[in-house]
Structure formats: C-alpha cells, structure tokens
C-alpha cells in the first residue's frame, strides 16, 4: 500500500468527527472500509495513530503530528485543482507582449491596469521593440501579441486596428519656429533635430519624408526614449517630432508644441497575432480586452 490522499482524508475525518461511524457518514463510505483504511495507514507508517475506546477515537502524539501534515497535503492538492482550473479558464497564466515606444507611453499603462484588475493572477511581460522586430517576433512565436505602428512588413501575422496617434513638432522657447502654430516638415529641415534612435519607425519615417522632398535630416542627437527627447529639446539641443500623447505625459517647460501639417503625421497603431483563433485562453482574454477598450 502506498500513502494516498483518500486514506489521509478519512484519517482527518475520523479525528474531526470523533468516531468511525460519523466519519463514514460524512465521507459517504462504509464504516468497515474506513476502519480498514486506518489500519492499513498505521501499518504503512509503522505507528499507532489512534486510540480506540468505547467512547470514540482520539489521536496519539504521532496521530496529531500526522493530522497537521495531512491537512497541509490535502490543502495543497486542492490548490493544485483550483489553480489548474484557473489555467483552463484563462484566469491564471502568462502573456508576452511586444510593443513599440509610442504604444507603451501613450496607451498601455491604463489598459494593462484595467486588465490586471480583472485578472490579478495573470502575469504580463511587456517588452519594448521596434515595429519591424515586433511583427517578426510574433510571427516567430517569441511573443503572443504585438503592438506596432502600421507599416509594410513581410511577417506572417494577422493585423487588427488598435489606436491612432498624431505626431507634433516640439521646439524650445526662443527657437525661430517657436512663433508658429503649425509647420510643414519641409519648413523644419533647416534646423537640427533630436530624434529617436535608428531602427525605430519614427526615425525611418522622418528620414524618408526628408528624402521625398529632396533634403536630408540634420540629426544632432539620437535618443532611446521620448522623455529623453523632450529633455534634450527643452535644453535647446534641437527640435523633435513625437506623438502628441507622449508630449502630454511629460511636464515640459521652456518648449512649445506645433502642429505638423503632414498627412503622415496621423498614424495608425495596430495589434498583431500569429492567429487569433490559435491564441491561448489567457492571451485571448488580453487581446479581446485591448480591442474592446
């Protein structure tokens, strides 16, 4: 005989009820079967666990010790069932999300907070990547969901609308363009820029737009985040282009935001997955939440 949870449960019931008959009734099993289980348990553990009298059953010192261990084991076994049930219904698990800096700074914090309030047992890993790397990462099964600025790509993924953002020009106080309310991109190309690092969609977008009008972009500095871009513009190092939503996040002083009068200033952010139908239950919950929010 091996130690099994049924015997432990019956042992606990006998001690809690005080008699074999009461424990048998509670567990819906014959009293003789309970008695046999207890005898086999004592034989297996080579210990007297119970003292049987005409007044009922009381545990020995060894029995009391086993009682505490048995309750712990039975509770852990029950927790396994509960947790696995949560997995099967998507209430527990992990999700890996790739997103570009625009999505992370403008949209993700409140969206993820509302989702995690609904599903506190789900762990989310949010990793910042450039847009091209995001579609590639999702296609190669290195992430469940991606959020990127819509652009041509060769990855085998499904794409869904998510949000739109609007690019604006940030200039320091006293700059020659600071007296304007709006500018075209061509009108900014005589001035030095602080821009996001090479490889980002915005960096590519700006270089392409300059090339389209036969000009080149004067890059004074490249940075890795929008907050760094804002600080450098505020310090007077150059001008910068970034989403309006990101500007609104930071308390920017000594700088002005101008409307960028270009069709490409309005951008679409999109979700991508390998297959909506093939998502895990957990990832599908987040995906549907993102579409609905």
Image (cartoon, grey):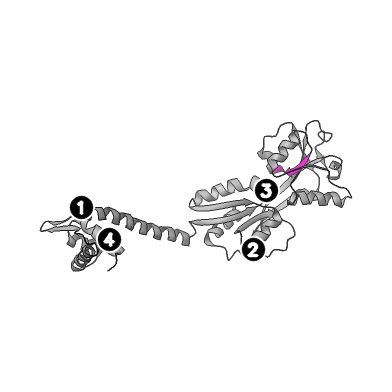
For label 4, the crowd category at 10 Å Cα-Cα, with few meaning under 14, some 14 to 19 and many 20 or more, is some
Question: Which residue lies most toward the left here?
Answer: 54
Q: Could you say which quadrant of the image residue 143 lies in?
A: bottom right
Give me the disc on residue 140: 2
Q: Nearer the viewer, residue 203 or 21?
A: 203
Mark 4 and mark 2 lie on one chain; the one further toward the N terminus is: 4
Q: Residue 61 got which mark?
A: 1
Q: Is residue 152 magenta?
A: no
Q: Which residue is mark 3?
A: 101
Q: From the viewer's perspective, is the residue at label 2 or at label 1 nearer?
A: 1
Residue 274 in the image: x percent, y percent? 63, 64
Q: CA separation, marks 1 and 4?
A: 18 Å
User: Is 256 placed left or right of 54 in the picture?
Assistant: right
What numbered label is drawn on residue 9?
Answer: 4
Q: CA distance from mark 4 to mark 3?
A: 54 Å
| Chain-order first, disc 3 or disc 2 | 3
């Amino acid at each position: 005989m091996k130690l099994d949870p049924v015997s432990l449960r019956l042992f606990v019931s006998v001690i809690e009820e005080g008699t074999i008959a009461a424990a048998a009734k509670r567990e819906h099993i014959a009293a003789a079967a309970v008695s046999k289980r207890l005898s086999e348990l004592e034989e297996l553990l080579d210990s007297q666990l119970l003292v049987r009298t005409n007044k009922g059953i009381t545990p020995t010192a060894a029995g009391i010790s086993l009682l505490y261990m048995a309750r712990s084991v039975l509770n852990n076994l029950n927790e396994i069932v509960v947790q696995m049930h949560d997995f099967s219904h998507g209430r527990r698990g992990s999700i890996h999300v790739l997103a570009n800096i625009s999505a992370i700074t403008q949209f993700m914090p409140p969206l993820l907070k509302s989702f995690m309030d609904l599903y506190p047992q789900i762990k989310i890993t949010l990793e910042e990547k450039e847009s091209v790397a995001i579609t590639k990462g999702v296609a190669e099964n290195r992430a469940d969901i991606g959020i990127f600025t819509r652009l041509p790509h060769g990855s085998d993924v499904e794409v869904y609308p998510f949000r739109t953002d609007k690019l604006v020009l940030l200039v320091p106080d006293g700059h020659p363009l600071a007296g304007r309310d709006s500018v075209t991109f061509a009108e900014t190309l005589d001035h030095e820029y602080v821009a996001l690092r090479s490889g980002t969609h915005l960096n590519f977008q700006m270089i392409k737009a300059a090339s389209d009008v036969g000009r080149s972009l004067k890059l004074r500095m490249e940075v890795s985040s929008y907050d760094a871009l804002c600080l450098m513009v505020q310090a007077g190092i150059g001008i910068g282009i970034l989403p309006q939503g990101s500007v609104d996040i930071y308390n920017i002083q000594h700088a002005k935001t101008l409307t960028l009068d270009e069709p490409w200033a309005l951008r679409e952010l999109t979700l991508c997955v390998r297959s909506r139908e093939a998502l895990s239950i957990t990832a599908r919950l987040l995906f549907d939440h993102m579409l609905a929010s």
